[in-house]
Amino acid sequence: MKTYLVTGGAGFIGSNFIHYMFGKYGKDIRIINVDALTYAGNLENLEGLDKEYDYIFIKADIRDKKRISKIFEENDIDFVVNFAAESHVDRSIENPEIFVETNVLGTLIMLNSAKAAWENEDGSFKEGKRFLHVSTDEVYGSLSDPEDYFYEDTPYDPHSPYSASKASSDFLVKAYVDTYHFPGVITNCSNNYGPFQFPEKLIPLIINNALHGKNLPVYGDGKNVRDWLYVDDHCKGIDMVLSNGRIGEKYNIGGHNEKQNIEIIHIILDTLREILPDDDPRKKNVSDDLITFVTDRKGHDRRYAIAPDKIRKELSWEPETAFKDGIKKTVKWYLSHEEWMAHVTSGDYQSYYEKMYEGR
Ligand code: NAD
Ligand code: DAU
């Protein structure tokens, strides 16, 4: 039985990944979820899993050397999947420091702890161990030529403090591979959407605001392009890279689904109007009039677009969820999880929202 150490498993992609893996492998795997439970971590996402599967949650910070080393000493970890990060670009513009601490220093501590646990006396590594670092397409910067795509060898050109911190952590993983022959691998994925995404991010924010008749803030002209992938397709790619990806390589993950932000907002509004029954009181709130163009994000990257050729060719990865189906599933999930949304939008999130969008 393989043991996975998943960091940041109480966040959006991490919790979807844990569900995906238990859905696929059931009782044949063990997952240890290490999460500090920042504002973005929510154990409600994983309720009941410990009763059904070999699942353990440990509340710990990846910056805490002692705790992380102890977890490796007490468990025979086969795979590390490093999701834990500060993930929101707008927050990184306001407060870059925590992004460097968690994303760079935290990743370094994860690498050192895995290295100490997995290294043989002669400097080689135990068989079958893998450290998968989950990264982003934002490290490549912004595309200006409409025909261009991000490939694995596209030079890194991060612009936001968030993407600079992710680029730094990618380089640390690469440095460990190059220097120690550490069994590391990196995935760079495009924008994910789906259940459990914190409503500071575009898609859940727009769904939530539209349902409550609140303004739908569009940064700049709304024509920035993001390449959207249903979260399960990302999870599938991570699983494939863990099992069959080549050590020391990086793999781009994306489904060629580029959309302008304004297009996304119209699709969400149309989907809400289609799905909500006429007698649902939330339906009357849903209106195009809520769309509000606001001051642009500082340093806003214009376009992201992933070329997933390598993962397709080497591992036969293909996305399974078309955007029209994925967005419907996602909207339906948020409609039926009002309580989840109420929990994550109370308290700290209220003050974040007011501060972030004040005067914009
Ligand atoms: P998220 O913000 O929803 O979740 C992050 C999780 O990490 C939370 O559970 C949080 O509690 C935890 N965490 C934060 N700091 C920690 C620390 N110091 N120690 C332990 N746990 C900590 O993020 P997400 O959107 O699920 O992204 C997960 C990973 O995937 C990130 O590394 C991100 O860079 C990457 N990624 C995200 C996307 C996307 O579209 N969301 C796309 C590509 C890559
Ligand atoms: O590309 C992968 C990245 O996608 C991940 O690495 C990040 O962790 C993840 O947060 C996401 O980053 P983005 O900045 O692209 O996502 P966000 O949802 O914040 O914004 C998507 C687009 O929508 C972006 O062009 C900014 C715009 N936007 C966002 C918000 C929150 C708005 O116009 N209005 C908003 O209120």
Image: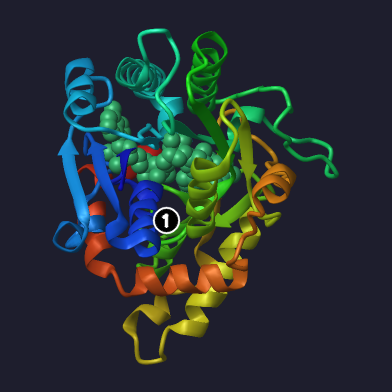
* Up/down of 241 relative to 107, above or below: below
Look at the numbered disc 1 and say if its residue's Cβ is closer than 8 Å to ligand 2. yes
Mark 1 highlights which residue? Answer: 205
Which colour style is shown? rainbow
Q: Quadrant of residue 136?
A: top right
Which residue lies at the image location 23% right of the left edge and 61% below the top edge? 342
Residue 35: % across, % down: 24, 37
Residue 2: % across, % down: 33, 44
Residue 129: % across, % down: 41, 31
- Could one spot residue 206 in this view of the protein? yes
Which residue lies at the image location 21% right of the left edge and 32% below the top edge? 75
Determine whether the residue tagged by mark 1 lies in a helix, strand or loop: helix
Which residue lies at the image location 18% right of the left edge and 44% below the top edge? 57
Which residue lies at the image location 58% right of the left edge and 39% below the top edge? 245
6 or 305, which lies in front? 6
| Label 1 Cα neighbours within 10 Å, binned few <14 / some 14-19 / many ≥20 | some
